[in-house]
Image (cartoon, rainbow, N blue to C red):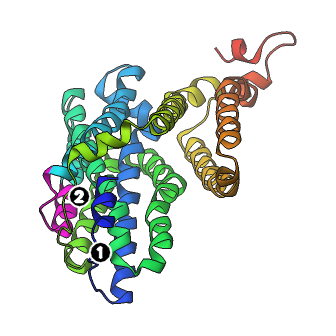
Amino acid sequence: MTELLETTSSSAAQPHSARRGWLGIGIVTAGTFTVVTSEMLPVGLLTPMRDDLRISEGTAGSALTVTGLVAAISAAPLTVLLGRFDRRWVLCGLMAVLTLGNLAAALAPNFAVMTAGRVLVGLGMGGVWSLAAGLAVRLVPTKSAGTAMSVVFSGIGVASVLGVPAGTYIGALAGWRAAFFAAAGLGMLVLLAIAVALPALPPTGGVALSGVLRLVRNARMRTGLLIVAFLVTGHFAAYTYVRPVLEQVASASAAQIGSLLLVYGIAGVAGTFLAGTPSVRSPRTTLITVSAVLAAGVLLLPDWAARSSPRGSSSPSGASPTAASR
């Protein structure tokens, strides 16, 4: 957000060819795909991580929590601290930090090292998010800025559809550490692409942290932030532990869980498009609908999983599927 404020506060746009500009958009999109995939990897790998590191499921799930918290806290300060540097090299540095974080997670002998790696992933993710929207505006002509921003943030949906299920499949085939190694390799490829193909993007002006804080003083902004915080917290509280639930209640295999995560990602992308127009016409109704659907999904998941379990379906008459699955 701070980078976007900085970009729009200056009328000086960097002149780049259309082809190179859209190539840059593609690279930044690959960056958002990489950071979201890196963030979400533990979702599909929670059980083998827990067993290998000899920790509880709750502790393993905190590997996802710490990344999100660090990203949220660090995004604005990082933008201010790195504001006087060329954005191309800032992105290179952030992808390097992300890559190191994934390598640390892949090599972690214990949960302390895993946590340190996930902190690095959070720092890289927070920085990339704070820059991505502003870079999209600078890389293409003004008339294409909206499309460019949509493409950049489509990396989120693609990561849900492809990145997280792919990590789950890799974990099933070669172990959970291989999935983090793959994420580190992807981060390095994106870093090289940024260094080679992205044009120079010197800072166009400065935005102080106080500018962001002023936005938070707006009552409507605070309300929106609180609603998003509650929705995201509720979503991740359930999503983080979906693998143990499916394994223990529905007896699902790693491959089946990967397929279910793929279906989940496709549904998420479809929901984004379905909610687009209604959210503009009636944001309150759309938020209520989204909240209700999310709550229903979380409440119904255990019962649906129990009914889908082979053990649950063969339970004696009168016995609950959940009890039979124990």
- Return the residue at label 2: 95
Q: Residue at x 51, y 29 (%)?
A: 230
**Amino acid type, label 2:** Met
Q: In the rendered structure, which disc, 2 or 1, sits on the residue that comes first in sequence?
A: 1
Question: Principal SS element in the magenta part?
Answer: helix
Q: Is residue 213 magenta?
A: no
Viewer-closest of 202 and 158: 202
Q: Position of residue 110 (x, y in %)?
A: 21, 28
Q: In the structure shown, which secondary structural element does the residue marked by tag 2 occupy?
A: helix
> In the image, which is nearer the foreground, mark 2 or mark 1?
1
**Range of residues picked out in magenta:** 81-96
Q: Residue at x 24, y 28 (%)?
A: 111
- In this figure, which residue is indicated by the disc labeled 1? 11
Q: Position of residue 92 (x, y in %)?
A: 19, 64
Residue at the right extreme of this rendering? 317
Q: Is residue 293 above or below residue 53?
A: below
